[in-house]
Amino acid sequence: MSDTRPILLWFRRDLRLSDHPALSAAAHSGRAVIPVFVHDEITQRLGAAPKWRLGLGVEAFAESLGELGLKLILRKGDALEEISRLVDETGAASVWWMRQYDPEQIKRDTKVKSALQGDGVEAKSFPGHLMFEPWDVQTGQGKFYQVYTPFWRAVRARDVPDRLSAPNKVKAPEQWPDSDDLDDWRMGDAMNRGAEVVRPYLHVGEAAARQRLAIFARDRIDSYHTDRDRMDSDATSGLSENLTYGEISPLALWDAGQRALADGKAGAETFLKEVVWREFAYHLVYHTPHITNESWRAGWESFPWRAESEETMRWKQGRTGIQIVDAAMRELYVTGRMHNRARMLVGSYLTKHMMTHWRVGQDWFAECLVDWDPAANAMGWQWVAGSGPDASPYFRIFNPDTQAEKFDPKRAYRTRWVAELSQSPPETAMAFFDACPRSWNLRPDARYPEPVVDLTAGRNRALSAYEQRKTA
């Protein structure tokens, strides 16, 4: 006789109804489903912007579940304690969830699974956060890939899981357990006055994500390969915000890219490569979890990185005196996001020209990015610093001025975000002074600063340090 007891469906970074294997399986089981989100120890440690954005995503997802007649149960506390308490309260026989792959979440999930199974409760994890499970992609020697291009070649023609539609009907329990009030969690408190500035730039929830993808596939994917690095135009999908909270699946992006490829859209393959770049980041985090907080390449911990300093604060404030770097850092504070090319430039300037440890930048992005992702942030910072999986880290020192000439030739990006460069600054540039902390005492009519580090001197110093490390 089949089990009719409820299923607790534990949601984390998978806030969607479609392409959700755990939800789909639960709906087809015929058993009552109790959706749960736990504001656990990992969520509590999130930076200001990602915690706030996650709260907005949870709110939108609760509304989507409500349309199915379901209620998202909210609990705050230790994940195992709250899940176990809900099992006792509801009589649930099963706890299902979608897998995560970074070390913090693996440790938590392993603990929860072991304890639940020890109590006779079915604990089951499902795929769906990635297209390819990390243990399924191997070299000919049975090892994981450490360089992106061979990884891309290995997966580009692979079959991916079938898309899953959102369920039309899910059985609800006869009685719902008690739930916290989301407002009581105050997930946006650390944003302070910045929340009001950043909010108009967000696209929250599954419906917004799907619309965003549709517009990109219709209007921009054809020129993506030539325009994606242009900082003065809106040429990218912008879906990193939705991907990180699972409001859209990588399968949805892959499907859109493959359709565009079949239609002869020139930028389709480049877009597919970017989707796989995310997969590569997660595979590296899974196989080499130290990448999240230690140098990925051996020997880099002894590199003479500098710690936090007064110059670092100028970098955070967008006052380095390098216009394209400052524009990017202010874009981050106003929108919660930053153009991908700009991320490489500000990262290179911090770690190479300023010789500052990549962890300083990693931590700042973890505080400020609404699209913060544990794998992408870790790999991105190590890649640009030279300690990560870059095939040519030694000489890759971006010149911000020449990059600006190439990808912001009419100065539109710099003008949009740096008020001191214009007699009549646009609202976007002025918004930075509404968002940044009052304690910074910054004014739009202040004199624009001289460079923290001269580009030529900074490059020569970095090359010398790299050369000494290579010789040693």
Image (cartoon, rainbow, N blue to C red):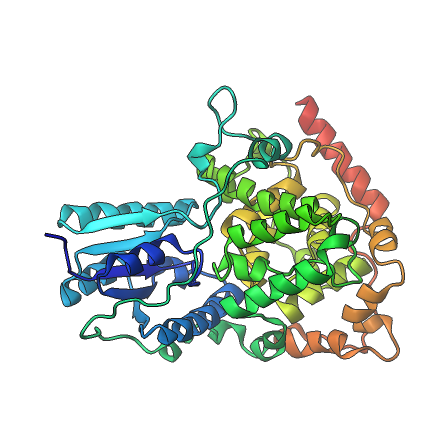
Q: How many marks?
A: 0
Q: Most extreme residue toward the left, as rendered? A: 1
The percent position of residue 214, horizontal first and vertical second, equals 62, 63
Q: Nearer the viewer, residue 110 or 150?
A: 150
Question: Is 182 on the left or on the right of 123, as rendered?
Answer: right
Q: Most extreme residue toward the front, as rendered? A: 263
Res. 99 visible in picture: yes
| Residue at x 68%, y 25% (from the top left corner) | 470
Q: Quadrant of residue 89?
A: bottom left
Q: Quadrant of residue 340?
A: bottom right
Res. 357 visible in picture: no
Question: Is 251 on the left or on the right of 235, as rendered?
Answer: left
Q: Quadrant of residue 217?
A: bottom right
Q: Look at the picture and state if 300 lies above or below 58.
A: above
Q: Nearer the viewer, residue 122 or 194?
A: 122
The percent position of residue 440, horizontal first and vertical second, equals 66, 72
| Residue at x 50%, y 51% (from the top left corner) | 374
Q: Quadrant of the C terminus?
A: top right
Question: Is 243 on the left or on the right of 232, as rendered?
Answer: left
The percent position of residue 427, horizontal first and vertical second, equals 76, 79
The percent position of residue 361, horizontal first and vertical second, equals 61, 52
Question: Is 64 on the left or on the right of 222, as rendered?
Answer: left
